[in-house]
Image (spheres, rainbow, N blue to C red):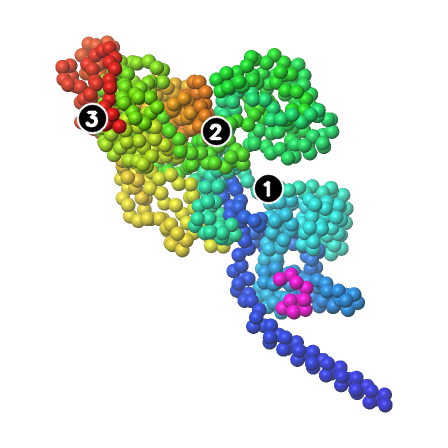
């Protein structure tokens, strides 16, 4: 009987085994065709964010929902690998992708408790799940995961599997992979992490929220210490190192992108262009965009814009605290909590006044703690009554602030190099600056406002403003083409015209000074920015000729008035338009195309785009175009020559005359740079609503604009030479620090001649007051008794007449 029962049970077990085997084969045959190809895994794209860099490789911005910094296996620290193996799968290098011990343990737990549980998951199984499968806990998903793990192990090496895992795993706070986690939690690269930091990150995959060092620091420490213990038990670290590591306090905190260079307006321009090219893939395909931005020049431009806007604000007085918060307590935690909801505006930090002294104050600054403000940082704060009026100078700090006021402070560096904290305020006035390489249009620096995060409006590319007298350079260049010379004498006298579009019956333009200079040489008129001379020049050469010439500088003629007001810069332009136009003078007469993207690289594919801009080059021969779209060959063809739009002679004369703007005209403050190779033109519009300086060196053109977004006036005397020129000077002082002075070389077809400075005519050999002027061979100055070139030119001093210009000229 017992023998029969034994045979029966053996038969049952054999049958069950065969059925199980048959079932396993059936399941395999059913699921195997549905398994994804491992080739897809080899070519996987891990949703790497878009990164934007300067020309010298400094990170400017990162865009994308998921933060990921892919690392090759060889770039992952050995301790990092050991920590993850200790925490997740210590038998990884031994099992074939599935740890049977872990599976049996998970199955036993389900039989005992009746609850489904994720158990026995090896690193290979996690890779299978993370790349291909859902996270649902079902037998079907688990079986698919096991089969896929076997396939992965057959086709990939252990190192390749680990590389995928360490780059893909979610580690909390939008960080995917150990490279991103190192940056997010510690602001470091993975290779820079300490052992406790490595263990903290390695403890996260099990439960990124539960063991998050930011949200649950105590649980995170416990999990870290568990990982360290496992590393010790497995022989990866000695006892002494373990003991030292577990005594280390947690130091994790949220870090933003590891941006090294502040250029958010440029980064946004790049982001917009990348989305235009690649749609939403721009944020996930791992594009690295290298721009033309020079980090040194960008920093200089940022400092120049901000420091001079603060200087403008101080000239016009203090508007007072942002608000009063009541009596400030002494509890620093409470003060910090109040300030936590107040954003910083660039370098202007929010602070609460905690104590007011006779000639100073104590403040608590957000994220900085307690600081003292001395009288040096307070005495400027006269009350602002209006843009043109301020109150009396304060005699004590109590006239400026009181305890509990919410104010702004800024750390500034004095001329002697010492740092001082000063009272400040968020400026209403804005500024923009752009610097371009004249030879090829590469944008070297761009600042679109005081703070991108306070106002994302990019004034370099989006603000269409009147250029004022900065537009006269194009008018005078057109005049040279029309036969005028720098010695041409034009009457600086009143002009009156009927103008139905104005509120008054007559248009009476004036010089900024309100004075008249009488007959004035063209060179002097440009240097002194004489409005009435510009109008007479434009009338003489004609609107049509001027427009045809202005078109050569890249301007949209639909935004330029087709009448005499054009001479005063009443059209609308952007600072980038002006930088492009002035680059024509800087490079000897060629029209370039400003650009900011130098090349684009895609993760895993290398360079997919490289710019090949047109270049200012007299002897270049066009032989092809650049690859402009993804998929084209990236090989760059021969240099693409920029079109010549003005002659070398015209360019030389304009350079020479605009150097006089700095030497003796409206931009003499720039002489403190101590250089003779700089040129430019100021610009100021009606009621000082816009202030400009458009200037250049042969290697760099730079344009500065200052104004209010709502077109409010800047205030009395806030001209281009006062409001905008200081920004340009500060920038150029740094930009040209190591650049040798470059002499302006006179091209062929020109000659020098001694002239009478009063008449502009050739001077007798014995005239002591004679000066030297430069002329084109084709434009010989008239001699005594000959007819002058232009209408309104007088052979000598005359009384300034009042002329009425016919309305049909407008």
Magenta stretch: includes residue 142: yes
**Measured along the vertical axis of the image, is residue 609 above or below residue 764?**
below
Label total for image: 3
Q: Closer to the camera, 135 or 708?
A: 708
Q: CA distance from mark 1 to mark 2?
A: 27 Å
Quarter occupied by residue 771: top left
**Measured along the vertical axis of the image, is residue 692 above or below residue 799?**
below
Tell me the residue at 63%/68% (across/down).
Answer: 144
Front label number (3 vs 2): 2
Query: Is 696 placed left or right of 22 in the picture?
Result: left
Q: CA distance from mark 3 to mark 2?
A: 40 Å
Mark 2 secondary-structure assignment: strand
Tell me the residue at 33%/18% (across/down).
Answer: 511
Query: Is 668 placed left or right of 329 in the picture?
Result: left
Q: Which mark is residue 256?
A: 1
Residue that carries the numbered disc 2 in the rendered image? 430
| Label whose residue precedes the other's in the sequence (3 or 1) | 1
| Label whose residue precedes the other's in the sequence (3 or 2) | 2
Which portion, as a residue range, is magenta? 134-144
**Measured along the vertical axis of the image, is residue 375 above or below residue 100?**
above
| Label whose residue precedes the other's in the sequence (1 or 2) | 1
The quarter of the image holding the N terminus is bottom right
Mark 2, other Cα within 10 Å: few <14 / some 14–19 / many ≥20: some
Marks 1 and 2 close (CB-CB < 8 Å): no
Q: Residue furthest right?
A: 1
Query: Is 73 placed left or right of 662 in the picture?
Result: right
Q: Is residue 210 visible?
A: yes
Query: Is 94 placed left or right of 528 in the picture?
Result: right
The image shows residue 168 at horizontal and vertical percentages of 60, 55
Q: Which mark is residue 483?
A: 3
């Amino acid at each position: 009987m017992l023998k029969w029962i034994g045979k029966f049970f053996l038969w049952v077990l054999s049958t069950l085994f065969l059925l199980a085997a048959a079932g396993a084969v059936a399941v395999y045959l059913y699921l195997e065709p549905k398994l994804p190809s491992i080739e897809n895994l080899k070519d996987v794209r891990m949703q790497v964010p878009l990164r934007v860099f300067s020309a010298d490789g400094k990170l400017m911005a990162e865009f994308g929902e998921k933060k990921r910094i892919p690392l090759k296996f060889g770039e992952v620290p050995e301790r990092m690998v050991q920590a993850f193996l200790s925490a997740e799968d210590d038998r990884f290098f031994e099992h074939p992708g599935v740890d049977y011990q872990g599976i049996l343990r998970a199955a036993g737990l389900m039989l005992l408790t009746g609850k489904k549980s994720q158990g026995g998951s090896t690193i290979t199984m996690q890779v299978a799940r993370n790349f291909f499968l859902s996270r649902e806990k079902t037998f079907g998903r688990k079986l698919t995961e096991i089969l896929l793990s076997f396939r992965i192990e057959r086709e990939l090496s252990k190192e390749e599997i680990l590389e995928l895992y360490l780059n893909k795993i979610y580690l909390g706070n939008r960080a995917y992979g150990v490279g991103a986690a190192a940056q997010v939690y510690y602001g470091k690269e993975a290779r820079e992490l300490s052992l406790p930091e490595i263990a903290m990150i390695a403890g996260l995959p099990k439960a990124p929220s539960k063991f998050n060092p930011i949200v649950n620091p105590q649980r995170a420490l416990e999990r870290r210490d568990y990982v360290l213990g496992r590393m010790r038990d497995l022989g990866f670290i000695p006892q002494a190192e373990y003991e030292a590591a577990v005594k280390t306090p947690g130091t994790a905190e949220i870090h933003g992108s590891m941006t090294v260079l502040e250029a958010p307006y440029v980064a946004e321009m790049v982001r917009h262009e990348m989305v235009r090219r690649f749609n939403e893939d721009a944020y996930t395909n791992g594009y690295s965009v290298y721009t033309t931005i020079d980090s040194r020049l960008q920093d200089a431009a940022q400092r120049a814009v901000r420091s001079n806007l603060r200087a403008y604000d101080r000239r016009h007085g203090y508007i007072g605290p942002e608000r009063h918060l009541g009596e400030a307590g002494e509890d620093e935690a409470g003060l910090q909590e109040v300030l936590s909801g107040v954003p910083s505006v660039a370098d202007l930090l929010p602070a609460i006044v905690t104590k007011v002294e006779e000639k100073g104050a104590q403040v608590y600054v957000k994220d900085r703690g307690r600081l003292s403000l001395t009288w040096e940082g307070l005495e400027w704060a006269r009350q602002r009554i209006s843009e043109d009026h301020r109150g009396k100078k304060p005699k004590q700090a109590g006239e400026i602030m009181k305890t509990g006021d919410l104010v702004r402070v800024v750390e500034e560096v004095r001329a002697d190099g010492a740092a001082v904290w000063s009272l400040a305020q968020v400026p209403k006035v804005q500024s923009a600056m752009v610097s371009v390489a004249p030879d090829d249009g590469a944008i070297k620096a761009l600042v679109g406002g005081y703070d991108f995060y306070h106002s994302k409006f990019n004034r370099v590319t989006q603000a269409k403003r009147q250029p004022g007298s900065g537009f006269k350079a194009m008018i005078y260049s057109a005049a040279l083409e029309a036969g005028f010379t720098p010695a041409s004498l034009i009457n600086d006298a009143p002009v009156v015209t009927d103008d139905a579009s104005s509120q008054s019956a007559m248009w009476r333009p004036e010089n900024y000074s309100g004075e008249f200079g009488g007959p004035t040489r063209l060179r002097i008129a440009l240097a002194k920015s004489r409005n009435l001379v510009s109008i007479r020049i434009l009338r003489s050469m004609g609107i049509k000729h001027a427009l045809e010439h202005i078109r050569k500088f890249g301007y949209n003629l639909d935004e330029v008035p087709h009448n005499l007001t054009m001479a005063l810069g009443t059209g609308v332009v952007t600072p980038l338009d002006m930088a492009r136009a002035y680059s024509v003078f800087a490079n000897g007469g060629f029209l370039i195309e400003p650009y900011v993207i130098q090349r684009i690289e895609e993760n895993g594919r290398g360079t997919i785009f490289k710019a090949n801009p047109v270049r200012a080059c007299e002897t270049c021969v066009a032989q092809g175009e650049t690859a402009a779209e993804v998929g084209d060959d990236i090989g760059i063809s021969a240099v693409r020559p920029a079109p010549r739009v003005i002659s070398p002679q015209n360019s030389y004369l304009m350079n020479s005359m605009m150097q006089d703007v700095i030497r003796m005209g409206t931009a003499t403050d720039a002489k403190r740079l101590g250089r003779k190779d700089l040129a430019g033109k100021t610009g100021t519009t009606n009621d000082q609503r816009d202030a400009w300086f458009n200037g250049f060196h042969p290697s760099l053109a730079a344009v500065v604009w200052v104004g209010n977004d709502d077109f409010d006036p800047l205030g009395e005397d806030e001209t281009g030479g006062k409001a905008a020129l200081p920004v340009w000077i500060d920038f150029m002082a740094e930009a040209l620090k190591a650049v040798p002075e470059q002499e302006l070389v006179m091209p062929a077809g020109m000659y020098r001649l001694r002239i009478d400075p009063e008449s502009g005519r050739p001077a007798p050999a014995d005239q002591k007051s004679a000066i030297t002027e430069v002329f084109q061979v084709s434009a010989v100055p008239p001699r005594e008794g000959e007819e002058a070139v232009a209408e309104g030119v007088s052979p000598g001093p005359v009384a300034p007449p009042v002329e009425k210009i016919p309305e049909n000229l407008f």
